[in-house]
Image (cartoon, grey):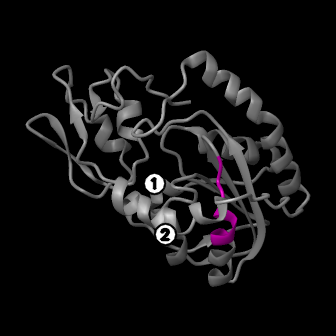
Amino acid sequence: MILYFTGTGNSRYVAEKVAEATGDTLLDIGERYKSGDVSPIDAGERLVICTPTYAWRIPAFIDEWLRQVEFTGSRRTWFVMTCGGNICNAGKYNEALCRAKHLNYMGTAEIKMPENYIAMFDAPEDDRAREIIAEAEPSIQEAIESIRIYREFKPVILKGAAKLMSGPVNKVFYAAAVKDKKFRTLDNCIGCGKCVSACVMNNIAMEDGKPVWNGNCTHCMACIAHCPVEAIEYGDKSVGQPRYHI
């Protein structure tokens, strides 16, 4: 079973490649979470979890959801994490999650994909995004080969402060930065509601034909990236930036 969550498509892209190579079934965590579905899941021959990296760990809401779900079948579990920079010490926390779930931790792979977090960083233009995706292919194939033959991933080598980023820095970042107050709509909003359907947290509602954010955001950037008329901004940081989605 290949479980994935994606905001702008990076993790889905990788998950689909893993599923194609292994023949395993794909399951969208976002759909399950959005509907409140925590019913048991049969992992089949292996359990692969593909997610983006949020503050150097898997997204907090996915950790929460995984802890609620009962997994049957194979206990061997691989994490594949897409990122714009690096995953730092995320593997430590993925391993702890596996221990809590009585799963056999098989490692965490880091896949560098185009940056989508335009609340803080610059997203690439289309041509550069395509180059980054092509550059990621060897890492994707290496991860696939390990999963296919039931081999553990190579450990990520950490240097300097990288060990701290996934720990105390992660908690501070979530508390200080992961908020939705800076989202705003422009006059060209057409009221289509795509941002509402894209929000995995059920955090966006339409009021008087415009989206309103209600304080439970995970900063996946799906709303801003998928707006068909680019009518959503995040403060001034996103102004003039490409709306990246794969």
* Residue 165 drawn in magenta: no
Residue at 50 percent across and 77 percent down: it is: 68
Is 146 above or below relative to 138?
below
Query: What percent of the width, then of the height, locates residue 219?
Result: 40, 48
Identify which residue, 210 or 74, lies in the foreground. 210
* Pointer 1 with pointer 2, Cβ within 8 A: no
Residue at mark 1? 31
The C terminus lies in which quarter of the figure? top right
Residue at mark 2? 65
Stretch of the chain drawn in magenta: 86-94
Please state if 52 lies on the left or on the right of 137 as rendered. Answer: left
Identify which residue, 152 or 150, lies in the foreground. 152
Quadrant of res 165: bottom right
Q: For the residue marked with disc 2, what is the amino acid? A: Trp
Residue at 65 percent across and 77 percent down: it is: 96
Q: Nearer the viewer, mark 1 or mark 2?
A: 2
Query: What percent of the width, then of the height, locates residue 210?
Result: 16, 35
Tell me the SS state at disc 1.
helix
Identify which residue, 197 or 132, lies in the foreground. 132
Q: For the residue marked with disc 1, what is the amino acid? A: Glu
Badge 2: residue crowd in 10 Å (few <14, some 14–19, many ≥20): some
Residue at 28 percent across and 49 percent down: it is: 180
Tell me the SS state at disc 2.
helix
Please state if 151 lies on the left or on the right of 38 as rendered. Answer: right
Query: How far apart in space, not on screen, are marks 1 and 2 (Cα)?
Result: 12 Å
Is 17 above or below relative to 78?
above
The N terminus lies in which quarter of the figure? bottom right
Number of residue marks: 2
